[in-house]
Image (cartoon, helix red, strand yellow):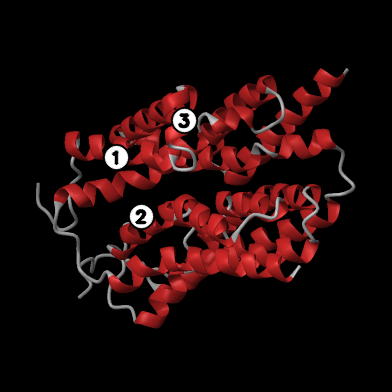
Amino acid sequence: MNTNKNFKPLTFKKGVKDGLPIGLGYFPVSLAFGVTASALSVPVFISIIMSMTNLTSAGQLAGLKIIAIGGSFLQIIFTQLVINSRYFLMSVSLSQKVENVSTIKRMLMSAGITDEIFGVAVSKKEPLTPKYFFGLILCPYIGWVLGTVVGACLGNVLPLVVVNSLGIALYSMFIAIFSNPAIKNKKLGFVVLISTALSCLIYFVPTLNKLLTGVASIVAALIASIIAALLFPVKMEGENG
Amino acid sequence: MVKMLLMVLVMAVVTFILRMIPLTFLRKKIRSRFLYSLFYYLPYAVLSAMTFPYIFFSTGSLVSGVVGTIVAITVAILSRSLALTAVASCVTVLVVNLLALI
């Protein structure tokens, strides 16, 4: 049963409206991805198919580098499992906000989970409807694929200094996602600060860095979240006080 | 070429499985307050750990990386816009990188 009767159900139209800024934000980032792909001499159609089937930022970039150096399948599977394990966590989070939705629709919805889409969806007070979620995915998907097409085609034309400058796009987009929640909510601010500090610590301490190659970010995030969950447990839905 | 295509598809399948399993099969509410809190905090923690310190080394020069980061944080807080934040930081980095060439 829908426990939030005082809310109107989220519509497809509302989803498209919420997704439009994400789609605009994805364009420069996937443009940077497409440019990088061409710079690594990965064929244009490979990077486009990758964007159409993967819809991940950091995962695609890591996969691209492995493909470019002719790495192994095992290497690519492991990298994706580690980098994209955060989607598993986000999917767990979102599963708590979905009510009375069929298996097929749940599977289709899950294909659209990205950092930014999660960020918007998780902040909704209402239960997530499939219609809203599909609307939310629409513009980001178009923006992501279109940016890749343009970037991959421009890749060989752009000078190195421009290509380098696009490298920051992905990270500044991450900052745009977590900075405002971190400022508004002190508990989230705490976890962001601790996670950042741990990540830097692992990066700059050589022994830790060697020990945790490839999983540094996940380990830092896990420790930070465990500390936050122990110190500041959050109120569960439907709980009074 | 075929290997590249297969690798892309393997990436897609692995990524889809990670996204699909919890949302499709986890139908119950998480009862443990600790686990609930953990999953509330994790996504934000992962994003910040993936950003720092790597953002500083993402532009080919540490100076432009640091300046770009400061601009990204400022624009993100003031505008709350993904697109504006991405474009503003890229343009800033480009300007700093071009100035370094002179």
Q: Residue at x 29, y 40 (%)?
A: A225
Q: Residues within 10 Å of mark 3 (few under 14, many from 20)?
A: some
Distance from disc 2 to disc 1, alpha carbons, whole Å, reads: 12 Å
- Secondary element under disc 3, as helix, strand or loop, is helix
Residue at mark 3: chain:
A
Q: Earlier in the sequence, mark 3 or mark 2?
A: 2
| Amino acid, disc 1 | Ser
Task: Specify whether disc 3 shares its chain with disc 1.
Answer: yes
Does residue A82 sit above or below A101 in this rendering? above
Q: Residues within 10 Å of mark 2 (few under 14, many from 20)?
A: many
Task: Give the residue furthest to the left.
Answer: A241
Residue A192 tag number? none
Distance from disc 3 to disc 2, alpha carbons, whole Å, reads: 24 Å
| Amino acid, disc 2 | Leu
Q: Is residue B14 left or right of residue B29?
A: right
Indicate the quadrant where residue A99 lies. Answer: bottom left
The answer to whether the residues at label 3 and label 1 have Cβ atoms under 8 Å apart is no
Q: Is residue A112 left or right of residue B100?
A: left
Q: Residue at x 19, y 64 (%)?
A: B29
Q: Earlier in the sequence, mark 2 or mark 1?
A: 2
Q: Nearer the viewer, mark 3 or mark 1?
A: 3
Does residue A91 sit above or below A13 in this rendering? above
